[in-house]
Amino acid sequence: MTTARDLRDASTKVLRDCVIHGYPIDPDSLAGWVYRGTSLGLPDVVAKLTWKTFQKTFHRDPSTGKLIGWNVRLEQDGIDAPSRPKTKRGRPVTEWNYEVISPEGVPMPEGFDRGLIIDYSRAANPPGVVRFMKDPLVALSEGSADELLGVSYAVVAGRTMETPTYFTLEREHPIDYVPHDHPRGAASISPLSLTRVERGWAEELFSAIVPTGGDEGLLAFMSADRETFWRCFDESTAPLVRAGLRPMVHTLTFLPLVSGFRKPFFALSEDERERFLQHASKSRAYFVRQSLVTLKTLACFAYFDDPRVRARYDATPPPGAP
């Protein structure tokens, strides 16, 4: 019998075979439970932009009878550490809401119909990539819902695109928090705010655009305080600018896939990133060039928003000073 622990170091080929040959799940066996999730199959650089461990919940909505759920962000204390939800204002941080449905009539890659489907398009989520995603979910043992295996794929214009994002779920404890019961729950998410994943994509672009790397005593971009920048950006920036950032980030993140690099920006090497940015700066498409100019401006704002960076330059004497 294959267990969740057995799959931690499995290849994506093995993981995909386990999904295709997994066992169906009784949705009632999930209702009311929190599962501990472990992300599998992703390169370390990608995992750092998202999370390695998380929680998924399965809640039977008493008003509709639907099986719904949400992701809970965890403090990244280690793959075997006890689950410790991140909190904000004393409540667990939740995101990526979903409804759990049967696979009938859902577009999907061949063989992904063995179990249930976690469908993010059927729940309150901000605009962005999340609304294109679906996760087939199968049991690792026949007749048991204690350990599950899932994978993410996208549906765009009716066509499916597989990803290497696999995860295991292990039953943890009964649900003890339902964000939908609170007025600041899932439905109140600002549609203009970037998701945590999209912010990670933007920061990878910012880091390449401001390539200090810690050289000459300069603070590396990824060591700077980016949270302050994002908070100010969401609170103070004009709605039109905020609305325009998402398509710009998506364009520059995924344009390398069709520009000869065959990988999204966050998976490129340092040399490939530099070559892509040079390519984008000379693009015949105005939107690509303008996206790069806009992100250069925001990258500088984000970098110089850190007081340690400002102090470094404030301490520099003017030209001609003794």
Image: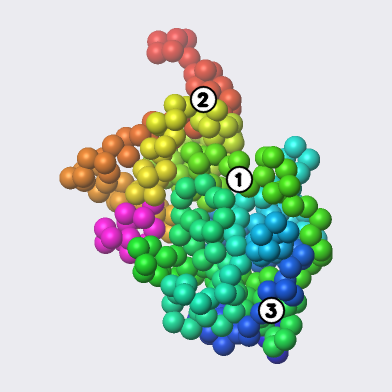
Residue at position x 40%, y 13% in the image: 319
Relative to the observer, which residue lies in front, 196 or 185? 185
Q: Which amino acid does label 1 sit on?
A: Ala
Q: Is residue 103 above or below residue 227?
A: below
Residue 128 % position (x, y): 46, 50
Image disc number at residue 26 = 3
Residue 211 % position (x, y): 42, 41
Residue at position x 58%, y 25% in the image: 307
Residue 222 % position (x, y): 54, 42
* Real-space Cα separation, disc 2 to disc 1, in angstroms: 22 Å
Relative to the observer, which residue lies in front, 288 or 176? 176
Image disc number at residue 30 = none
Q: What element carries label 3?
A: loop
* Real-space Cα separation, disc 1 to disc 3, in angstroms: 27 Å
Residue 252 % position (x, y): 35, 48
Residue at position x 27%, y 44% in the image: 288
- What is the span of residues highlighted in magenta in the rendered image? 253-264
Q: Which colour scheme is used?
A: rainbow
The answer to whether residue 260 is left or right of residue 93 is left
Quadrant for the N terminus in the image: bottom right
User: Mark 1 — residue?
Assistant: 187
**Whether residue 145 is visible:** yes
Residue at position x 60%, y 55% in the image: 97
Q: Quadrant of residue 59?
A: bottom right
Q: Is residue 95 above or below residue 215?
A: below
Q: Is mark 2 on a helix, strand or loop?
A: helix
User: Mark 2 — residue?
Assistant: 236
Decide which of tag 2 and tag 3 comes sooner along the chain.
Answer: 3
